[in-house]
Image (cartoon, rainbow, N blue to C red):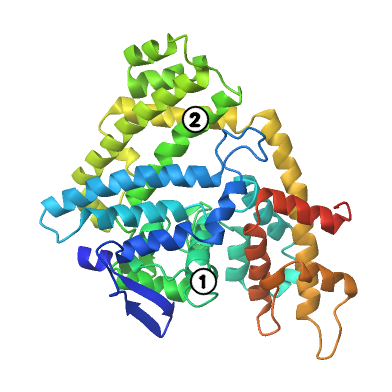
Amino acid sequence: MWKKLLSKKRFYSIDNINVDSNEDFFRTSFHKDYDRLIFSNAFRRLAKKTQVHPLSKNDHVHNRLTHSLEVASVGRSLGLSAGKMLKDKGHDIDPYDIAYIIQTACLAHDIGNPPFGHAGEEVIKEWFKEHENQELLKSLSKEQHSDLQHLDGNAQSFRIVTQLENNLFSGGMNLSFATLGTLVKYPYSSSHCKMIGKSKFNYFHSEEEFFELLFTELGLKIGGGRYKRHPLSYLMEAADDICYGLLDLQDAIELKIISLDDVEPVFNLLCGEKLRQKVYSNSNCSDTQKVSRLVAKAMNELVLEAMVVFENKLEIIESENQPQDLIEFFLNDKLKQGILNAKKLASDKVFNETRKVELELGAYNIIETILDHLIRATYEFYNLEENEALSFRNKRVLALMGDNKPLKTQSLFEMYQRVVDYLVGMTDNHARHVANQLNGTGN
């Protein structure tokens, strides 16, 4: 089973899939995955994308890049522990391979997030829902409408690394199958969202053929269009949960959105009241420094607990009756409740903070402006008869897209996907700049 799960195959096209045998002791297949990710343009752009607080002027606040790097650090630790555990159980596994696989998946997990974070994601979904019955969208299939109306950063991340980045529509980054499988938290398409009443999914219908091939090769296809999660994806997810659950609060302290009193109950559970009191009583430390020390201790405790759960529940994680995540199986009730309380505090007090809401409303206008102009220009381009000329305005609008602009050989849906690819790839600042240009208010 684990031989398949750790596949070194790489995808270049449906007819060109090869095992990576070109390895050196200092640079394995999975190490190469990490390098391809960290040197990519898509990853570098995360430095100017919102984590929680849009367009923050405080340089200490997390952006998507710093968040991804921290998640990858936690993921590497979990990977080394998991690799040692699997090796001790008799599997022919190098623990460092597991560490690189999870670390790389962690780096890639947010690479498909649009500008302005989840607010940006919601605007895109709403735009396609609101325009569903307009002429420019009416001809799309039910599945195509579903992909656009449920647009999810997880599916876009999968599309970027397998289709768009580095080798356009020739395997993308050509990552190993093991790393790609670990990246997937929701192994189903957008059509499945309506069935389960949730909005998260991991592949668009345009990537369905490759997704089926990938999960079949990994031994994760169940049948009837259903797939299991890669066991290592649970550790990637745990690293993300641990980081954003705690570091969102750290940012909120830095921005003075919440106080030490607000997070006191959380750290009493995660670190113990005695340590929390000792840290709070240190008059030489700022509030941010105090919380940073407690976050470090809490993260260590949560990582150890996640690893215990992964080992104890490995059999069910490998089965067809997989759990939702690792946190639901935490044996330490204080740690389990502490991380859940941290997420709830962020939801109640941080995500609804006034300045954040104001900036997100601005994001609505920015993204709606871009979609209004680009989708309409694309629709005109699609309907052009041979030798007909595109209107001057729409010609200039599509010129903004550069290499992302649609091609006449593409279907209407494929053209719209390229618009979304272009929009999702923008940083917060670039999206604002493009919207200003389209509105005639730019410099």
Query: In the image as oriented, which residue stretches furthest toward the bottom?
Result: 386
The quadrant in which residue 105 appears is: bottom left
Number of numbered tags placed on the structure image:
2
Residue 214 vs residue 156: left or right?
A: left
- On the image, numbered disc 1 is attached to which residue? 163
The answer to whether any part of residue 134 appears in the image is: no
Look at label 2 and name its amino acid: Lys
x%, y% of residue 60?
A: 56, 33
Q: Nearer the viewer, mark 2 or mark 1?
A: 1
Q: Neighbour class for label 2 at 10 Å: few (<14), some, many (≥20)? A: few
Residue 66 vs residue 18: left or right?
A: right
Q: Neighbour class for label 1 at 10 Å: few (<14), some, many (≥20)? A: many
- On the image, numbered disc 2 is attached to which residue? 344
At 76% from the left edge and 43% from the top edge, which residue is drawn?
Answer: 362
x%, y% of residue 35?
A: 41, 60
Q: Secondary structure at mark 2?
A: helix
Mark closer to the chain start, 2 or 1: 1
Q: Which mark is residue 430?
A: none
At 39% from the left edge and 59% from the top edge, which residue is drawn?
Answer: 34
Decide: marks 2, 1 in contact (CB < 8 A)? no
The answer to whether any part of residue 377 appears in the image is: yes
The quadrant in which residue 135 appears is: bottom right
- In front of the other: 244 or 193: 244
At 44% from the left edge and 63% from the top edge, which residue is drawn?
Answer: 36
Q: Quadrant of the N terminus?
A: bottom left
Q: Secondary structure at mark 1?
A: helix
Q: CA distance from mark 2 to mark 1?
A: 36 Å
Using the image, determine if residue 389 lies above or below residue 442: below
Residue 321 vs residue 122: left or right?
A: left
x%, y% of residue 369?
A: 79, 55
Using the image, determine if residue 165 lies above or below residue 361: below
Look at label 1 and name its amino acid: Gln
